[in-house]
Image: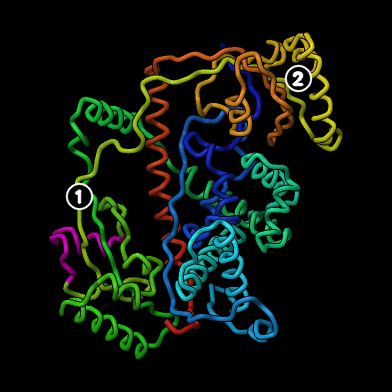
Amino acid sequence: MKRHAVSVVPLARGQSRRTARVLLGALLGTLVAAAALPAAAQLRAPNSPRATGIFVPQSGASAAPASPSQPQLGQGTQGGGEGRSQLVDEVVAVVNNSVITRRELLDSADEIEAQVRAAGRPVPPRADLLGQVLERLVMERVQTQAAESAGIRVNDQEVDRAIESVAQQNKISVTALRNQVERSGMSWEKYRGELRKQVQVIRLREREVDSKVQVYDGEIDNFLAAQAAQASGGGAAAGGPVEYDVAHILVRVPENASEAQKAELRAKAEGLLKQVQGGADFAQLAQSQSEGPEAARGGSLGYREIGRLPTQFANAVLDLEPGAVVPEVIESANGYHVVKLASKRQGSAGGGDAMPSRITQTQVRHILIRTGPNMPEGEAQRQLSTMRDRVTHGGDFADLARRYSQDGSAQNGGELGWISPGELVPEFEQAMNRLRPGEVSQPVVSQFGVHLIQVLDRREVEVSAEKQRDFARAQVREQKLRAAYDDWLQQLREAAYVEYRVNR
């Protein structure tokens, strides 16, 4: 059935179900894992320029987290109070032209610790938590500054829509969300401010990363071939690129450092190299001495193809055996590096999630009332509740859709045809999936208005060749976006001037 132009949410397949849920988790209860997550990894902007219908574009996007470094900050002061107020002007880090104060660091750490405890998760040691939170604040500041420099602004209405999206994804009202936020120890205004910064940074990422990632037919063919090989018991397809796990210890050189300072820092790096060559544990040394964002994971950059490594690293490790250390200190624009090839492996030409052979499709129709200055959300919900009562008492859904729906599907009685998983915006799809054939939903709010949804039927179908290519394209795009986003974060971090004013 022909699909009519409605309003596409800017959430890609594969990410749509987890986006707002991840955001709420990151702010309200999963901070142990998310303490170092860049803001841009946590929420897809709800008002992207790509919004043109309720169908989701068949592409994937995912963001890889930035790894925290762990400056040794000691125990700090917990719980605020008079001691905290005396620390307000003490600077713990300089990020380009702004500073992070000890009070800001301790307040953020207290909020996260309270949220972790409320979620029933073990709290990391205070010193480790402070290190993770400081690097998280640095990464957020770097990205926010880049977004502001690019002229990206987010108004109050866009923040309101993002909050509504978060509440809907978590199946609670905005009021309940606010109560939950405030119970966690974070003020509502601060939550809005954090969300505003996240949306702002995501806009920048969409422009600088997402819009530049392309998927080619040959890549889809390779993915499908790899999936076929795995399905036939052949394991990972041969011919995938070699991936290198490179680790490094960074001795950072400040901007405008004198020749004497550079010589002193180079000598420090050479001393670290000698320690490694003498048998010192590289990962432990990186955790305690490296000034790079990967310090917490032993300096590891993770598995990357050779083309995704910094040029100096790629040239140095190309002919090394796994476990070997580059025999000389490497100089870059950021400082001096001690580099090790931890391991390497043969990558798969495919990868990603296994492709399903059969999927469940839903035949669905809806009535949409768009909200705005002349149609408050509450009034739209009231009208649709009245229509639902009429339908449940024998009224004709299709007739009501033709008369009242403000969607392109209205002329067809609101019918959207047979829908495959991942094709609709998450608010709509989740409500649809909870309905049995013949049932009508309560009013469902999305960023495009309020919907009344009726499921007509469901069926199991074989995945068509076209759907297989859609799935492959989404998986390949998600892999490429993850790599591109990781590289972009690394470039932002390396280009920033960051000075830690704490004992490391």
Q: Is residue 447 magenta?
A: no
Residue at point 27%, 86% (across, down): 267
Could you tell me residue 501's position as x and y percent?
50, 83
326 vs 438, left or right, is: left
Q: Is residue 53 visible?
A: no
Span colored in magenta? 310-326
Residue at point 53%, 46% (across, down): 206
Could you tell me residue 152's position as x and y percent?
63, 54
Above/below status of 147 relative to 68:
above
Which corner quadrant holds the N terminus?
A: top right
Q: Which residue is mark 2?
A: 405
Above/below status of 66 relative to 454:
below
Q: Which residue is mark 1?
A: 345
Could you tell me residue 129's position as x and y percent?
49, 70
Could you tell me residue 229's position as x and y percent?
22, 28
Total residue callouts: 2
Q: Is residue 311 magenta?
A: yes
Name the outermost residue toward the bottom. Answer: 260
The residue lying toward the viewer, choosing from 492 and 66, is 66
Mark 1 and mark 2 lie on one chain; the one further toward the N terminus is 1
Which corner quadrant holds the C terminus?
A: bottom left
Residue at point 20%, 64% (across, down): 316
Badge 1: how crowded within 10 Å, few (<14), some, or many (20+)?
some
- Give residue 238's quadrant in the image: top left
Callout 2 secondary element: loop
Name the outermost residue toward the front. Answer: 120
Callout 1 secondary element: strand
Disc 1 marks which amino acid?
Arg
Q: CA distance from mark 1 to mark 2?
A: 55 Å
